[in-house]
Image (spheres, rainbow, N blue to C red):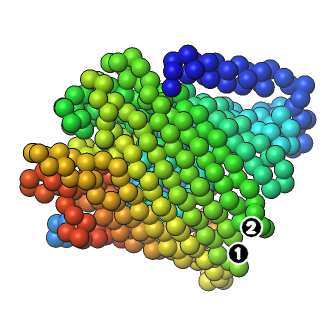
Amino acid sequence: MHNFTKHLLTKLFILLSAGFIALPSYAQEAEDEDYLKIGGAFRLNVVSQNYESDPTPTSTYATFDTWRLNVAARYSGVVLDFEYRFYPTFNTHFIHHGFLGYNFSEDLEMQLGVTQVPFGNLTYNSHSWWFLIPYYIGLEDDYDMGIKFNYAATEKLNLSFAYFRQPEPAGPAYGSASFGGPGAGTYSYNVIPDNDGVLSETGATSSIRELNQFNLRAAYEIIEGTELGFSGQLQGLYNSALQETDYGNTWAVHLNSDFSGFNLKLQYTSYDYKARDDDGNTLNRVQMGAYGDPYYGDGVAARGSIITAGLAYSIPVQWGPISNILPYFDYSMMTKDGSLSPGNADFDFQNSYMMVPGFMITAGNIYTYVDFAFGKNHPWLTDSFGTGLGAGHLDEQGEPLPLEDLDWNLRFNINIGYYF
C-alpha cells in the first residue's frame, strides 16, 4: 500500500473516531444503574504428555495455570471492562483486555483500548480449553490496542469495524531474550522481530512488528440460531530497518449454528503477512510470540490457510453440584505456502494438524475442561517447543519430515477453574 494512502486511511479513521466521541448529543441515556464489579479466576492444570520422546515419571504433573483479576464498571454511561492475568508457570503477567466503552445508541457501541479483534467466530472459534490452530498464529481470541465499533444494522445483521494501532502491551517478559520483542510477553500471538536471522533465507535479521491494522466483520443470522459471516483484516508490519510498512491481508468465512442442544462452528481462513527482512527480501516465515516464549527457530509460515471445525452437545444433568456436561470435538488443519532450500533442492513446508476431543463440566462457579489434545507439527504439542507452524519438524539433513513420518503427539490435560 502506498504511504500516502496508508497515512490517509489512518488519519481518516482517527478523525471519524474522534468525531463519534465528541458527539454526546447522539448518545442514549443510560438505562441501567451505575455499578462496580470485581471478580476473577483461579485455575489449575493436571497434565500427562506423550510426545516424540518416551514418557518419563515427570511427563505427568500438576501446575498452577493462572489467576486473574477482572473489573467491570459503569458511570454516567461510560463502561470499563478490564482483565489482568498472572501465569506463574511462564513467570510472566500481562493485560488480557482493558477498554472504555460507550453506547451512542441501542445499535452502536464503541470500545477504546485493548479489545478483542473482530475476526471469525466470536467469542471463540473452538470449544476446548486448548482452542485451535488459528489461536496460535493470532487469529482466534486475539486482542490489540485501538478502537472498535459494533453496529447492529438490523435484527439479523451485525457489523464491526476496528482500527488497531499496535498489539496489546507486553508483560515483564518483553525483551528478556534475544528472540524477544514487542508482543512476546502477551496473551495473544503477535509478529515480533527475528533478531537472530534464523527465519530469513539469507540469514538477515527481521526488525518487524505489527503497526496499523484495519478489521471489518459482518455476521448475518440466515436462520434462527445460525450465523454466517465474513471477516477481513488489513495488517501492517513495520520494518524499523527499512523504515517501511508492508500490508498483508487475512480473510475468513465462518458459520456458527445452535440446534437441538448442539453447537457447530466452521471456519475457513486465508492469510498472507507479506513480510520482509532487513535486506528487503520477502520472508517465507515470520517470528511470533506470546507468554514470553517465541517460536524458536521455526516461526510461522508467512502465507497459508486454515480449516477448522468443532461440534459440541450440551447435556443438562443434576449430579450434586454438576449442572451440565458438554462433550465436544474440535479439529483444524493448516496448509502453508513456502519451502526451504537446503542444498540445491526445495522442500515444501509441511502441514500442521490439531484435534481436541474432550468435555467440559459445569458445577456452580467451577468449570473443568478434560481435553485430549493431539497434534502434528504443533508448536505446543512437542518436545521441541515452538517447532511446527513454519517448515515443520526437520530431519538430520535439515529437511522437513513428511507427515507420514510423524506420530500424533498427545497431551491429556485437565483444567480446573474457579470463576468468581
Q: Under tag 2, what secondary structure?
A: loop
Q: Position of residue 95 (x, y in %)?
A: 51, 38
Return the residue found at the far front.
344
Q: Secondary structure at mark 1?
A: strand
Q: Is residue 279 above or below residue 150?
A: above
Pointer 2 local density, CA inside 10 Å: few below 14, some 14–19, many at least 20: few
Q: Position of residue 403 (x, y in %)?
A: 25, 66
Left or right: residue 187 compared with residue 239:
right
Image quarter of residue 82: top right
Residue identifier under label 1: 259
Name the image quarter holding the C terminus: bottom right
Between 306 and 318, the one lying in front of the other is 306
Residue 337 against residue 47 in the figure, above or below: above
Q: Earlier in the sequence, mark 2 or mark 1?
A: 2
The amino acid type found where label 1 is placed reads Phe
Q: Nearer the viewer, residue 260 or 351?
A: 351
Residue 219 located left or right of residue 156: left
Task: Give residue 312's mark.
Answer: none
The quadrant holding residue 412 is: bottom left
Q: Quadrant of residue 405?
A: bottom left
Q: x, y (%) of residue 54?
A: 16, 70
384 vs 398, left or right, is right
Q: Are marks 2 and 1 in contact (CB under 8 Å)?
A: yes
Q: Is residue 125 above or below residue 54?
A: above
Residue 225: mark in rendering: 2
